Amino acid sequence: MMNFGFTEEQSMVRKMVRDFVDKEIMPYISEWDAKGHSEPRILERLAELDLMGVCIPEEYGGSGMDYNTLAIVCEELERGDTAFRTAVSVHTGLNSMTLLQWGNEEQKQKYLVPQAKGEKLAAFGLTEPNAGSDVAALQTTAVKDGDHYILNGSKTWISLCDTADHFLVFAYTDKSKNHHGISCFIVERDMPGFSSKAIKGKLGIRAGNTGEIFFDSIRVPKENLLGKEGEGFKIAMAALDNGRFTVAAGACGTTMACLEASIKYCEERKTFGKEIGKHQLVQQMIAKMEAGLEMSRLLVFRAGWLKNQGKRNTRETSLAKWQACDFANDAANDAVQIHGAYGYSNEYPVERYLRNSKAPVIYEGTREIHTIMQAEYVLGYRQDKPLRNTLPAWPFEEALNKI
C-alpha cells in the first residue's frame, strides 16, 4: 500500500535543499543564465551536502536514501533552476544508478564510489546528431582489439560535456544485429582521443553545460564494458527509466516555482481597483498550476514507490515524465500571461521558467514518444519483460515506521 506521508528524513532533506536553493542559487541565477555561465561551485556544494549520491547505498559511497527522496531533491533544485536538476539527473539518475544496476563489483568500486561521494562527476552519452528517439540509428562504433575496444564517433546534447570525468557511452559492437548489437562502455575524459565542445545559443537551461563529445580511436579497456556485449540497448532503456523519473520530479519544481512567482505577483499587482488574483481568469490559471503540481507529484511518487520495491516502472515513469513536463510547460506559459508585459522580460523569473520548461518536453523521450508508449500499453501492443538486472529495492519498511 502506498503511503503519502513523508518520513522525518525526507522532510529534513526537502528543507535543506530548499534553504540551499534560496541562499546559493536564487540570488545569482538570473546573472548566470544571462551570461550562459555554468557555476561549478553549486555541484561542489551539493557534494558537500551528500546529495550527489542520494539513493546510492552507503556501501558504495552514497547517502542510502530512497528513490522518492531523490525526487524531492530534484524538485527543489529545479525550483531554483533546471540546470542544476539536470546535473543531478545525469550524474545520479542516468549514470550512477545505471552503474548500480548493471556494474560489476570492480566497476562499482572504481567508478560508482567516487561518483556517489561527489568526488567525480559523471555523464551519459546516447544521443547523436541522427539518433535521438531512434536509438538504433546511432553511428558510434566499438571494435574489439585484443584487451581493448576502439571507439569512434560522437554524441550530442550531452549535459556536463565539458565537466564530467566519466561517461557511459553507447556504441555498436555488431551493426548487423541492429539494436541487439549495441554495447555500453565506461569512458574517462582523460583517455587519449576524447574531446568535447559546448553548444551555445540555447533557448533555455543556459546556466547548464551542454554540448558534444567526440571519440577519435579511443582505446577503452575491455574491463570498461558495462554488462555484456549486445546489452547496450537494454542498459540504455533501464537508464532512461531512472533519468525520466528525475526529469518528471524536476518538472514539479518548475510548476512550483511558477506558482510561487505568480502568487507573489498577484499580491503586488492591481488592476481595475483590486489585486489581479481576485480576477476569475487569473484564478483559473492559478488553479490549473496547483492541480498540475499535485497530479504530477502523485505520478512521480507512484513511480518512486515502485522503484523502492525493486519493481519495473517503465510505464509509470513514462506517464509521469510526459504529464509532469507538459504541466510545467503549461504552468510557465500561464505564469508569463499572469505577469503580462513584465513576464516577457527578465525582470521577473517567469520568462526563464518558460524557456527552461521546453527542453524537458523534448529530451529523454519527446511527448510524442511517451504518447505512443502509453497508447501501446493500453492497447496491449507493448509489454515490459523482466530485465536481467534490476535496481536494488530500498528498505522502505524501516522508513515507513518513522512516519
Image (cartoon, rainbow, N blue to C red):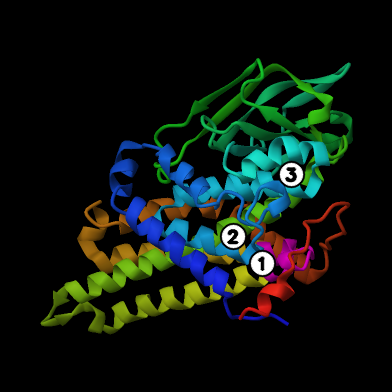
At label 1, which amino acid type do we have? Gly
Pointer 2 residue: 70
Pointer 1 residue: 304
Say which residue appears at 66% left-offset and 15% top-offset.
Answer: 192
Residue 367 in view here: no
At label 2, which amino acid type do we have? Leu
Q: Is residue 240 magenta?
A: no
Give coordinates of residue 64: x percent, y percent.
Answer: 66, 58
Q: Is residue 305 magenta?
A: yes
| In-front residue for pair 62/309 | 62
Where disc 3 sits, the SS reads helix
> Do callouts 2 and 3 mark residues in contact (Cβ within 8 Å)?
no
| In-front residue for pair 400/346 | 400
Where disc 1 sits, the SS reads helix
- Nearest to N terminus: mark 1 or mark 3: 3
Give coordinates of residue 377: x percent, y percent.
Answer: 77, 67
> Do callouts 2 and 1 mark residues in contact (Cβ within 8 Å)?
yes
Kindly give the residue lying farthest to the left in the view shown: 273
Q: Which picture quadrant has residue 133?
A: top right
Pointer 3 residue: 99
